[in-house]
Image: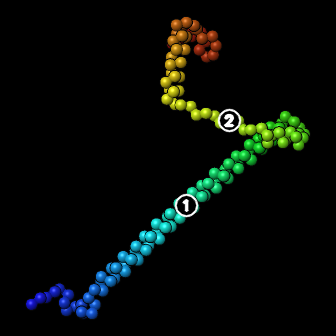
Amino acid sequence: MKTTLFAGIVPRSQRGVALVTVLLMLAMMSAMAVALVYKVNHEQHLQAADSGNTAAYYGAEAGMEKMMSDLSLLYTQIAAPTNCDIAKLQATPPPPPIPKTDCALAQSVIPKLVQKELLGLAAQNRPNSSGSFHGCSGI
């Protein structure tokens, strides 16, 4: 005779209910995961658009600050500037950006130049003629 642990407890009409319940829970959790992925993707697109807007805002702020600085400088030079003087401010281009230096080049060239200069001073063995080390000599 075949006996099972829950043979007397679970009626025959309820067999397979656990399977259906687990499948429904799995479907519900899958839907929540898809919604979460969609929401994260949507937020990333919104953030990218917002960062573009932020860059544009600060670019406009920088332009206004530059114009205010130019106007301030103009008013320190000319007490009553004409419309032509103010219009000339718009025509002058901003100064070129400062070029980035190559750090490896600077680290290799500058110490050699300093070393040459120090060796040259040591060879001359000249006393310092000014400052707090007046009268002291070389290296």
Q: Is residue 22 depicted above or below 101 in this figure? A: below
> At numbered mark 2, what does the secondary structure look like: helix, strand or loop?
loop
Mark 1 residue type = His
The quarter of the image holding the N terminus is bottom left
Judged left or right of residue 16, residue 36 is right
The residue lying at 37 percent from left, 80 percent from top is 24
> At numbered mark 1, what does the secondary structure look like: helix, strand or loop?
helix
The residue lying at 46 percent from left, 68 percent from top is 36
Location of residue 25 (image quadrant): bottom left
> Which is nearer the eye, 100 or 121?
100
- Within 10 Å of disc 1 (Cα), the crowding (few <14, some 14-19, many 20+) is few
Q: Where is residue 92 in the image (x, y as percent from the top left)?
A: 77, 38
Location of residue 128 (image quadrant): top right
Q: Where is residue 122 in the image (x, y as percent from the top left)?
A: 52, 10
Q: Could you give the CA–CA distance between mark 1 and mark 2, rounded to whole angstroms? A: 34 Å
Residue 61's label in the rendered image is none
Q: Can residue 72 be seen here?
A: no
CB atoms of marks 1 and 2 within 8 Å: no
Q: Can residue 70 be seen here?
A: yes
The residue lying at 68 percent from left, 48 percent from top is 59
Q: Position of residue 16 (x, y in %)?
A: 28, 86
> Which scheme is used to colour this image of the protein?
rainbow
Judged left or right of residue 31, residue 127 is right
Mark 2 residue type = Pro
The residue lying at 49 percent from left, 24 percent from top is 108
- Within 10 Å of disc 2 (Cα), the crowding (few <14, some 14-19, many 20+) is few
Residue 96's label in the rendered image is 2
Q: Is residue 40 depicted above or below 132 in this figure? A: below
Q: Position of residue 43 (x, y in %)?
A: 54, 63
- Quickly name the residue at label 1: 45
Q: N-terminal of the two: label 1 or label 2?
A: 1
Q: Is residue 104 depicted above or below 120 in this figure? A: below
